Amino acid sequence: MRAVHFCKSCGKVQPPAPVDYFTFFGLPRKLNLDVTVLEKDFYELSRKLHPDLNAGAGSQEQEWSLQQSSLLNDAHRTLKDPIKRTQYLLQLEGVELEEQSKTATEEARTTGQVKKQIVPPDLLEEVFELNMQLEELRMHKKMGEDDPALIEEIGRQKLELEEKQEALLRELEFRWKMWDGMIQREQNGQPVSGEERKQERDKMVDVLNRRNYIRNLVRDVGEVLEN
Amino acid sequence: MASDRIVGIDLGTTNSLVAFMQGESPVVIPGDDGSNLVPSVVALDQNNQPVIGNAARKHLTETPERAVYSIKRLMGRGVDDIQEELKFFPFRLAEDLQAGEVLRIRLGEKTFTPPEISALILRQLKRNAERFFGAQVTKAVITVPAYFNDAQRQATKDAGRIAGLEVLRLVNEPTAASLAYGLDRKQNGIVAVYDLGGGTFDISILKLHDGIFEVIATNGDTHLGGDDIDNLLITIALDDTLGDLGLDLRSKDLRHNAEAVQAIRNAVIEAKIALSLQPSVKLDVELPGGKRYVREITREQFEQLIQPIIDRTVGPCKQALKDAGLKPEQIDEVVLVGGSTRIPKVRALVKELFHREPHTDLNPDEVVALGAAVQANILGGGSVATENMLLLDVTPLSLGIEVAGGVTDKIILRNSTIPASATQFYTTQIDGQANVAIHVLQGERELAKDCRSLARFDLKGIPAMAAGMARIEVKFLIDANGILHVSAREQRSGKEAEIQVQPSYGLTDEQVEGMILDSFDSAEEDFRQRQIIESRNEAATILAALDKGKKSPAWGHLTTDEKKTIAKMEKALIAVKAEDDYQAIRKAIDALNQGTTRLAELMMDTAVSTALKGKTMDEADMGEGPTAPHPMAKAEFE
């Protein structure tokens, strides 16, 4: 069921109900969703909720329209992006993803240390090597020296990392399938154990963490290559 | 209803315009000098009365210490931000400016904040619209550069309020332009709007589909525009005059230097404009002491000079494309906005960036105001022309909070569709703590000190609890104008926490209240007075024209009845002209206008037939000749 956004009899904007983003769009808490349908819904709701189209209404309705349309935009922005959608769902499930990363970031910055990240074990050797090369390139650049071979090598590794990032997205999509299947079973009246739910969550957290790690690495490499 | 008419205003760095939706299409409302553009120049005359627009321009050269231009560059900025501007612009800051105070500019003996000066321009536009409609105008949509931050937007909104306008919406300039373009070609696709104006640069990328104008990404520079080109040319001229003529026009102690610099400024602006059409131009300016500054500039030299300036638009364009996740080939149309896009070199740069010929069908000076009128129409409930049209804009800059270690924690990312919100939770650090301080920032940089400080909030009245027990929910909401609102609630007690806002740059509500130009009590009366004066002027014009008509041979061709009717109407107009009812005066003018249509026609005929008889136009006593408008026509302007 979609949350009630308008009055059934008069069609006027209603105050926003305290709902999560999935409920706002009347969606189940599943991760595989048709972004085209979501966008269509977003436009349709925008045409009713946007403050521009309620500018002539009373001040109370205008306020509700502002609240509702910001909720609509927040929900759309979160759900249309595969990573944000997954993070949001995990957060609804009680996983404090953002808190963890934020605390780590803050700590790293206050102490002036490099943010301690758990390097995925399968990447350990590669990352160590890459970091050495990046350091070398930075030194070269500082001295104003050119090292085309090194740049080419780093560029090649960047491509590999990007491929890994893509592969992780596929892996995440696979985890979605598992999660959605579980939710479907639940909806069909079959009990899902807390343990199974936790396992599915943890697997997604793991994929997200690895993906984040690689994304940051790609970004850093990109910066060094560009500068 | 006339009283509900909402106008669209482009409050520009160099020129400002007011437009409205006439039937199915937006039109610009001309000023009393007949010009669509009101130069954004404000001066104080010898009686300390404000003069605005074209009338103020002569003050720039004659009494430069009493005039100001390009005030938009100072909107929403602090003293520290504008040091660079002060090197190039003759802004005279108030000497008694306190740290943290809103800037004040000196005009003669008085000082004004940038929103007050902008308000004077807005009031002029408001008056132009009122004269056009013959009715009061109180509601407006005002455009701002897409890349304007919260403080700059707030300052613009304040200016509207000071001018006695309810600002229904701030619309981003490139988005407004896309509305004007989209009106007659309702098609789907990706559009890039490249807007290089007098003082600001914006690039916006929009997705158009079925009437929805959705901004996907925007970027820009709020201090990049034609002004910078002018300043570059002025700098060269000042170096030349010092080197070749030994004249140091930079020294501030000589008053006539300011006049000379203004004369040079006028000359280089003319030269810049001319160079868009011709291969070379000659500068020739008279300087103090009878010396002349003469120099030839070729387009090639000009293009070389401005290259570094226009190159500064490349970075924002590339970033916007990147943020939109698009390649230049995926852009279907490129639209040029702003006077500086008339420069051929700028057009060439845009073509190179987006791999296609940009559109220039609409006047780049007017398209933003026209779009504002379209948005005004949508807000007013829409019409056939704007049916199904909806603008979905974005916030140009990320919103962040300062967290431990002076780091910015971004809570709403740039290019998020607005309205947008984010909720943060805060707690207390010590037992019984009653206040929590929050520092809100805007910008993309990692460190708080590199971002723009928007405001400091103090959450007050938190119920006494052990450290870490309070759970204060703070909601940050960016509205459809791109302006931030903050509300807070302590969750355990359910108590609304009181928020005390200290805007980092900007006026408080009370200050704005005190600046309002026409307080609501006098607005109606002021409007009436102005209308009376204007309608009397119009009456005088038509009566004078009638006198002339009576002396023309055509008068003899009228029947006695016709003459009687005209005489009656004339008497009626003379009678009401002495009264204070402007509506009655207008009515009498219209009646006399109608009644004299045949006389006017006869005058034309007589003129033609007399001419055919071999008489000259002068002898035909037509005064203004047959090319003049309907001799009885209502005077359009004073």
Image (tube, coloured by chain):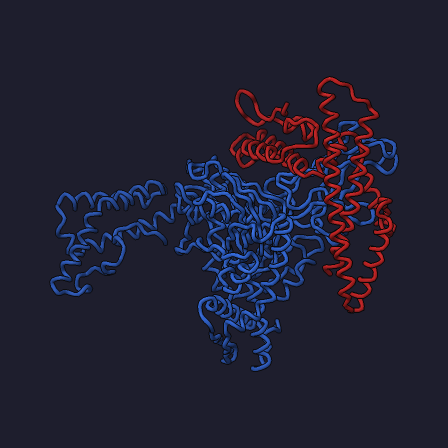
Q: Is residue B246 visible?
A: yes
Count every numbered label the image shows and give the total. 0
Q: Is residue B120 visible?
A: no
Q: Residue at x 80, y 43 (%)?
A: A210
Chain coloured blue in the rendered structure: B
Q: Is residue B635 left or right of residue B417?
A: left
B278 shown above or below B572: below
Q: Residue at x 66, y 46 (%)?
A: B414
Q: Residue B138: image x %, image y %?
A: 49, 41
B136 shown above or below B194: above
Q: Residue B497: image x %, image y %?
A: 75, 33
Along the viewing direction, whichever of B149 and A148 lies nearer the viewer: A148
Q: Is residue A132 left or right of residue B634?
A: right
Along the viewing direction, whichever of B298 and B223 lies nearer the viewer: B298
Q: What is chain A's hue in the picture?
A: red
Q: Residue at x 71, y 49 (%)?
A: B453
Image quarter where the N terminus of chain B lies is top left
Q: Residue A121: image x %, image y %?
A: 87, 44
Q: Residue A187: image x %, image y %?
A: 71, 20
Along the viewing direction, whichever of B581 and A222 lies nearer the viewer: A222
Q: Is residue A133 left or right of residue B305?
A: right
B498 shown above or below B505: above
Along the viewing direction, whichever of B31 and B102 lies nearer the viewer: B31
In the displayed image of the protein, which residue is found farthest to the top? Answer: A189
Q: Residue at x 70, y 55 (%)?
A: B98
Image quarter where the C terminus of chain B lies is bottom left
In the displayed image of the protein, which residue is found farthest to the left? Answer: B613
Q: Is residue A163 left or right of residue B429?
A: left
